[in-house]
Image (tube, grey):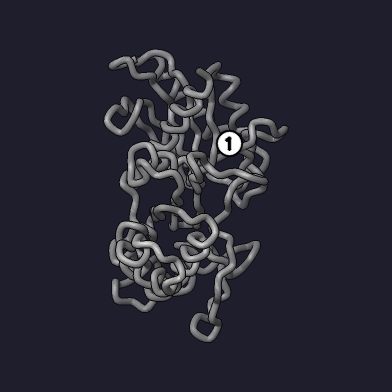
Amino acid sequence: MKNNLPLYGAIEGGGTKFICAVGSGPNSIRAESRFETTTPAETLRQVVEFFKQQEEKTGDLSAIGFACFGPLDPAPASPTYGHILPTPKPGWTNADVVGILRKEFDIPIAFDTDVNGAALGEWRWGKAQGLQTFIYLTIGTGIGGGAYVEGNLLHGLIHPEMGHILIKHDLEKDPFEGVCPFHGDCFEGLASGVAIEKRWGMRGSLLTQDHMAWDLEAEYIAQALMSYTMTLSPQRIIIGGGVGSLGHLLPKVQKRTRELINGYIQSPAILENIESYIVNPGLGNRSGMLGAIALAEQTLQKKS
């Protein structure tokens, strides 16, 4: 303990890398480590070793929060709770990642999607503070979204898959067929970082700000945001990820989203303050890691 604050373990599990940390919040991170995502056994072994080493230095952890890539099973009552569901990531389908941690740590372990974790982090310390309903969307290698609705992270059959909604695709304007192995030209298939690279032959970071790619990207993102706005009525939409956080893209998305809504939602948030309605994360690229701490904090409070 430090300043009487519980000490939490945080895991941001991505398809490319895992980030682990120990701390209590943005200003009290004691240690942090990152390593490549390999096999479940090898990757979780490194996670366990990191936390064991930190416990020797700082004392026992109170809880662990695990914000992980999906799809996954976040329902505690489910027989496959804590497992990764069928995924293109080789070797991870049906991996019991929470079970591995429970064998090593007899403390509460919170488990949710990486984007739900990031959403909770933004609610706790970022640009969603004080809100009851909002969306966190990440646009990077893939596209995913977390929803916080009436004070709770949204789950259902499993969890939201906002990257896989269908959007209008003008094949004359954009003949690119999409990259999603399941749906082809869904939102992720057309607008993810992988889609940008395959469509234009280079990474988005190498395209100039005036490249035609960005008007097309803004169109697809705005279509998705319009749909989310109509269905969930969020008080704010936060967009992160390597593509979503590009400063020159955000104004295009804001403008086009307002145009598509076309006055149907008579709210000042849309009509007058779209720049405050669609925003980048307050926590930058640390939303996921800090969100894992927020998950651990939340699960410990529920146990109390």
Indicate the quadrant where residue 261 lies.
bottom left
Report whether residue 197 is seen: no
Instruction: Identify the residue at the far front of this view.
Output: 266
Q: Nearer the viewer, residue 40 or 260?
A: 260
Report whether residue 33 is seen: yes
Query: Does residue 50 lie above or below 248 as drawn?
Result: above
Dot 1 corresponds to which residue?
A: 40
Give the left or right position of residue 240, taking residue 154 as reference.
left
Rendered residue at 51%/60% (across/down):
228
- Look at the numbered disc 1 and give the secondary structure of its residue: helix
Query: Does residue 56 lie above or below 115 as drawn?
Result: above
Q: Nearer the viewer, residue 172 or 20?
A: 172
Q: Where is residue 171 in the image (x, y as percent from the top left)?
A: 55, 82
Rendered residue at 50%/48% (across/down):
147
Instruction: Identify the residue at the far right of this view.
Output: 79
Indicate the quadrant where residue 74 lies.
top right
Give the left or right position of residue 79, taking residue 1 as reference.
right
On-image quarter of the N terminus: top left
Indicate the quadrant where residue 215 lies.
bottom left
Rendered residue at 30%/16% (across/down):
2
Give the left or right position of residue 124, taking residue 188 as reference.
left
Determine crowd level at label 1: few under 14, some 14-19, many 20+ residues with C-alpha closer than 10 A.
Answer: some
Q: How many labels does the image show?
A: 1
Instruction: Identify the residue at the far bottom of this view.
Output: 172
**Identity of the amino acid at label 1?**
Pro
Query: Does residue 229 lie above or below 149 as drawn?
Result: below
Q: Nearer the viewer, residue 132 or 173?
A: 132
Q: Position of residue 242 (x, y in %)?
A: 38, 56
Rendered residue at 60%/27% (across/down):
100
